[in-house]
Amino acid sequence: MKLRFNVLPLALLLLATLTASAQLMQKKETYTRADSLRGMLTPLRTAYDINYYHLDVKFDIDKKFISGSNLFKFTATQNFNKLQFDLYANLKVEKVQYKGRELPFAREAAAVFITFPKTITKGSKEEFIVYYSGNPTVAKRAPWDGGVVYTLDSLGKPYVATACQGAGASIWWPTKDHQSDEVDSMLISISVPKGLKDVSNGRLRKVTELADGYTRFDWFVANPINNYDVAANIANYNHMEDSYAGEKGTLTIDYWVLPYHQQAAEKQFGRDVKRMLKSFEYWFGPYPWYEDGYKLVETPHLGMEHQSAVAYGNRYRNGYLGRDLSGTGLGLTWDFIIVHESGHEWFGNNITSKDIADMWLHESFTNYSESLFIETYSGKQAGLEYLKGLRKIIQNDIPIIGPYNVNKEGSGDMYPKGANMLGLIRTLVNNDDKWRAILRGLNKTFYHQTVTTAQIENYMSKEAGINLSPVFDQYLRYKDIPTLDLKFENGKIYAKWTTDVKNFNVPVKLGKKGGELYFVKLNNEYAPVNFPGLTKDNLEIDTLDYYIKVNGLAK
């Protein structure tokens, strides 16, 4: 999640930040070849399937310089003699080595093309090593922009972290930088000046004191991981350990924090982490990374869903930097970064969109997970009120799904609007046990996979037993929400939907004020609403479960 909030008055903050990506997209109606090179799956990328990386990088913090290598192990999916990997142009490719010899390579924008001396045959397993160096982009406002954060802690010691969602992992290391192909496992070796520690994804395998005054930390990730989740976090960390009795057995928990924050971390993490795990395992199924454990790592930026090493920078406060984004007060009883970023372990990390245009699959479900967390401990009504409260930050500016093949996201509305869409779908399912089974089924069916929007839509419709296409189409592919139009003639009530989607045959819940609400199936043509004694004055529309506009009810 690229958290799009800043220290501004809240109303201005939300308006300015949630729509930042959307505004950029509106200004840029055409895309460059560089966009396509980054975003499109060409044969130069689909020809090989990544199996394993060994990223080995040394951080010269004083010079803001990195140097090292990345080993690519892959399986050929077809015959080829040329492929593409990615590395930002400001970083130098020193050489590419294959079977003891250097390969010729060419560069265009952030793409690097290498040519093999002979054809790589389909099904064969090969490897090459990229050696590189340079001054990676310095993030000025991570995690909203990408790169490396260089700062000092309160004691004047180096405090460094990477954050690259959106910008892409190739901003600091050579990789096949496309979400569709996750490496199966990975060794991350980060060398840092003596006296500092690196915390990366997975489990710490080895610490080696090097002759040049550096220390290398080797972290092994046993599961598939998307590129932007791979992280280096460098500081004078203290380490705390805990465990959780979860659905798959004992889950190890590790906290890496600045020494002077240990007491605050023990209190904040101790309160929220296990209850978060309990809630999300109930709703979504087992935590997806038992082999790699669960970690919270204190960082100089606000937060990011780095798989098995969640970045935490919320300053040990409840809410989002002390604020409740819903305006209900319900968001001030838990730590937003712990809950939201950990929710991404299921949606975003376990289930990853193939194209960044489908990032709603990450953000809508995870934003929705916040309301389920509240529901777990404060009841369903509270969860619904929180979800409704988030609507005030929705802009309805452009579609949630972005343009494909150019590495562009859609509207920032993917967070609260997408979450409210999911709340509506739950209402239409009208069976909370079935709804929970759908959420858990998603994480089981698409376990450790990259997916498309179509796959998720089809699965949810099938399991719900409802054609949900009209809902997905209107909320994801158009900027406007459905409008319920009412008219009153000769003592009778008529209603219809006004939508971009044709044949929007979605039932709405309505009834008499103070009484039970019932599903009434409507379409895009006016139809009578026949309830005995129902009048304009006592008509009530369910606007808690439905994020819609209503026309014609005002007196």
Image (spheres, grey):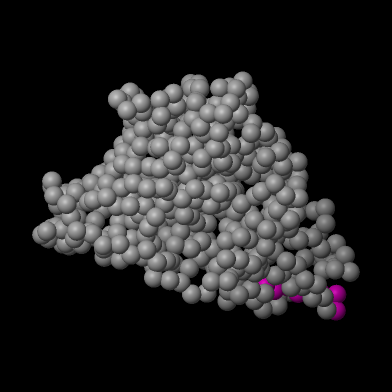
Name the spot of residue 500 as percent of width and height, x first: 61, 75
Task: Count up the numbered dots.
Answer: 0
- 407 over 291 or under it: above or below: below
Name the spot of residue 52 as percent of width and height, x first: 27, 43
What's the magenta bit mostly, secondary-structure-wise?
strand
Q: Name the quadrant containing residue 83.
A: bottom left
446 to the left or right of 6: left
Q: Is residue 79 magenta?
A: no
Name the spot of residue 215 as percent of width and height, x first: 36, 27
Q: Is residue 467 visible?
A: no
Q: Is residue 333 visible?
A: yes
Residue found at x 49% / y 37%: 160
- 259 over 554 or under it: above or below: above
Q: 116 or 225, which is in the foreground?
A: 116
Specify start and end residues of the magenta stretch as a single range.
490-497
Q: Residue furthest front?
A: 63
Residue found at x 30% / y 56%: 85
69 to the left or right of 125: right
Q: Is residue 496 magenta?
A: yes
Name the spot of residue 511 as percent of width and height, x first: 77, 60
Q: Name the quadrant containing residue 177.
A: bottom left
Residue found at x 40% / y 43%: 65
User: Quarter of the image containing the C terminus?
Assistant: bottom right
Residue found at x 70% / y 77%: 526
Q: 214 or 528, which is in the foreground?
A: 214
Q: Name the quadrant containing residue 117.
A: bottom left
